[in-house]
Amino acid sequence: MRWLFLSLAGPGIWAAGFAGVYALHGAGCALGWPGTALAAGLDLHRAVLWAGWLATLAAGALLLTRLPVVADGGLVHQLPRAGAWIGLTATLLTLLPVAVATSC
């Protein structure tokens, strides 16, 4: 049963990050964060979105580094690493546009 949890951990991290970053996007637009300037021409909204995206990437990378590498252990032993890679790749590809595109 543990392998099932570990197999779903990568996509679960992506799902939580996806929901969190999009929630921050909506909250930031509603609260006027794009108008709050920070250092180096960066606004609060963009900084928060980048922080959420990078935190989700870090969580996925941490999961991937903590999983054991099993060279020839069959599908049961390789599925958790595959799930971690899927979650990390999905985080990179689906949250990057939110972090870099025009805000509201």
Image (spheres, rainbow, N blue to C red):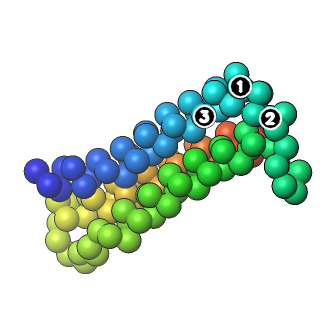
Q: Please tell me which residue is depicted at 64% across the width and 26% down the height of the picture.
A: 26
Q: Residue furthest right?
A: 41
Would you name the residue on which mark 1 appears? 31
Residue type of the residue flagged with mark 1: Leu
Q: Separation of disc 2 and disc 3 at Cα? A: 12 Å
CB within 8 Å, label 2 to label 3 = no
Query: In this picture, is 60 found above or below 31?
Result: below
Task: Identify the disc placed on residue 24.
Answer: 3
**Residue 93 visible (yes or no):** no
**Residue 48 visible (yes or no):** yes
Q: Is residue 24 left or right of residue 88?
A: right
Q: Is residue 93 left or right of residue 59?
A: right
| Quadrant position of residue 102 | top right
Q: Please tell me which residue is depicted at 60% across the width and 44% down the height of the picture.
A: 95
Does label 3 or label 1 sit earlier along the sequence?
A: 3
Residue 98, image x and y in percent?
67, 39
Q: 24 or 87, which lies in front?
A: 24
Residue 34, image x and y in percent?
80, 35
Question: Could you tell me which secondary element the residue under label 2 belongs to?
Answer: helix
Q: Mark 3 or mark 1, which is nearer to you?
A: 1
Does label 2 or label 3 sit earlier along the sequence?
A: 3
Query: In this picture, is 2 found above or below 68?
Result: above
Question: Could you tell me which secondary element the residue under label 1 belongs to?
Answer: helix
Would you name the residue on which mark 2 appears? 34
Q: Please tell me which residue is depicted at 89% across the width and 51% down the height of the picture.
A: 41
Tell me if mark 1 has few (under 14), some (14-19) or many (20+) residues whose alpha carbon lies within 10 angstroms of its own: few
Residue type of the residue flagged with mark 2: Pro
